Image (cartoon, rainbow, N blue to C red):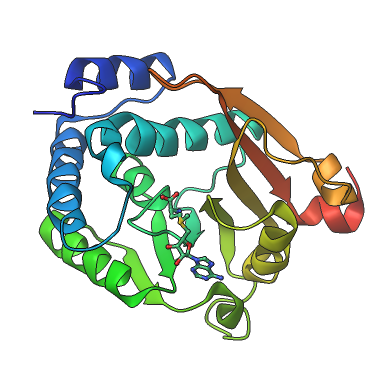
Amino acid sequence: MVGIGVSAENFLSKASSSGIQVNREALAQLAIYERELISWNRRMNLIAKGDETNIWSRHFLDSLIGWSSSLSLIPNSLPLNPVILDIGTGAGFPGLPIKIVWSEVKLTLVESVRKKTLFLKHLLEVLKLNDVNVICARAESLAKDAKHGNRYDFVLSRAVGSIEELLKLSFPLLKGSGKLTAWRGEEAPLSSDSRVTRCKSSSYGLPGEPHNRKIIILSKGDSFHGC
Ligand code: SAM
């Protein structure tokens, strides 16, 4: 059974009204994700205890609607098998719910806290997901590695650092055509950085949440060639 905050029907209907189709297999995988997350959260601090009954909304829907909103800001920009990096993924957000629903994604999750990466590796085994890589490292160190520099179509990040910090972390990792997609609160501080003032953004609500969420998308190419 799905969490108390949002029922399975609410989850599917909210996802569907946001243009996101979640098939039966993905729904079953999300249910396993919820179960494992609650179980591991008893032993380690993966999400706030108060969020355990709101995983379907605050974590799954937020990840999925944020991604879908960002794609609607850049129509026709999604490659066939997008190569995506999620910086500071914690318990897998936003990258893993996206991978579960958009299975064609090739995903790398980066997290500096080892015990969180142990949870992620366990989850990947249970879910039997392909094309997902978990790295225990600070994102700063990845850009220096030829395997990661200039490689990604998208860098995603939710609840990690300021937008300026994310620009510094993500742009060396993105391809020339790549994009940074950042999940922010609607009241996230504005920035005077000219790359940020030119960004595209979109707001959305989540069931039972008083404040809207905001997705911000910045193209690496725009910062070099202007909009
Ligand atoms: N993105 C997840 C979410 O929205 O639920 C986790 C957010 S949590 C507030 C921030 C996470 O980013 C922490 O797990 C932290 O260890 C990780 N982190 C912060 N800076 C990082 C960096 N430079 N490289 C890798 N991980 C980082």
Please state which of residues 151 and 36 is positioned toward the viewer in this rendering: 36
Question: For residue 164, what is the image quadrant?
Answer: bottom right
Q: What residue is rendered at 58% in x and 57% in y?
A: 153
Question: For residue 45, what is the image quadrant?
Answer: bottom left
> Residue 52 vs residue 188: left or right?
left
Classify the position of the C terminus by image quarter.
top right
Q: How many marks?
A: 0
Determine the residue located farthest toward the left in the rendered image.
Answer: 1
- Residue 132 to residue 9: above or below: below
Please state which of residues 121 and 107 is positioned toward the viewer in this rendering: 121
Asked if one can make out residue 103 in the rendered structure from this viewpoint, the answer is no
Please state which of residues 164 and 79 is positioned toward the viewer in this rendering: 164
Determine the residue located farthest toward the front in the rendered image.
Answer: 50
> Residue 215 vs residue 115: left or right?
right
> Residue 193 vs residue 174: left or right?
right
Q: Position of residue 79 (x, y in %)?
A: 53, 48
- Residue 138 to residue 24: above or below: below
Q: Position of residue 202 (x, y in %)?
A: 64, 27
Q: What residue is rendered at 29% in x and 38% in y?
A: 50
- Residue 195 to residue 119: above or below: above
Q: Position of residue 44 (x, y in %)?
A: 23, 63
Q: Position of residue 185 (x, y in %)?
A: 59, 35
Q: What residue is rendered at 8% in x and 28% in y?
A: 1
- Residue 129 to residue 52: above or below: below
Asked if one can make out residue 147 in the rendered structure from this viewpoint, the answer is yes
Question: For residue 13, what is the image quadrant?
Answer: top left
